[in-house]
Image (cartoon, helix red, strand yellow):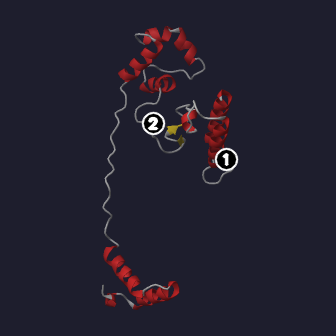
Amino acid sequence: MPSNQLNSLIQNEASRLAEHYKIDSEALLEFAQFVIVNYKKKDKAVKKVTKKIKPLSMADLKKAVYSYFEVKDTTELKKSGSFKMATDGMEPMNLGLKDSWEVLYRKFIGVLPGEDQEEGYGCINGIDIFKYFLPWRVFDLNPKSASKEDIKKAYHALSKTYHPDTSGTGDTKVFDRINTMYQSIGAEA
């Protein structure tokens, strides 16, 4: 590439760098020319194909919860002793709202479609720790094979990141939730 299009400032800097790093000044001048020609061009973005996961309808949520508690409808669910016992201590719910059915689904059925690879605040290993209490998944451990030492290592790794005294990543709410999860699986192991 011709270097005559490059001003003397660029040519002098290329010579200085070539001498300092013991590399060919022509290579630097070619690179400078390449940058000038291409700096405004946009990268061809790789289109990330993400399949939109359709959220469960309220009817699907109800059906799953009814099945779990072995009832036919909401009236029967409210009267169910196992439902009352299972939800004792939970915030009061308005079963006319989809949000309440999602809370029940998360608590008793499992992870809602589309919420298994979440990112952002409070998300560890794809799980929002404020929506789900899944310590084994958060700690990225197999409950059948994890030893007490494995649990301890996973806890310490997360603690180093989320301890309130850690600048940048420390967070009291997240750390408290991790501690609660650690205590729950530490007692099981």
Image check: 128 left or right of 42? right
Front-most of 77 and 162?
162
Identify residue type, mark 2: Asp
Q: Position of residue 185 (x, y in %)?
A: 63, 31
**Where residue 116 is drawn, which disc sits there?**
2
Q: Quadrant of residue 56?
A: top left
Q: How many neighbours does mark 1 have within 10 angstroms: few (below 14), some (14-19), or many (20 or more)?
A: some
Front-most of 56 and 135?
135
The residue that disc 1 covers is 164
Choose mark 1 or mark 2, whichever is in front.
2
Q: How many neighbours does mark 2 have within 10 angstroms: few (below 14), some (14-19), or many (20 or more)?
A: few
Where is 34 relative to 24, above or below? above
Residue sticking out furthest to the front: 145
Judging from the image, what secondary structure is the residue with disc 2 in?
Answer: loop
Front-most of 164 and 31?
31
Where is 159 relative to 177, above or below? below
Q: Position of residue 130 (x, y in %)?
A: 55, 35
Judging from the image, what secondary structure is the residue with disc 1 in?
Answer: loop
Q: Quadrant of residue 66?
A: top left
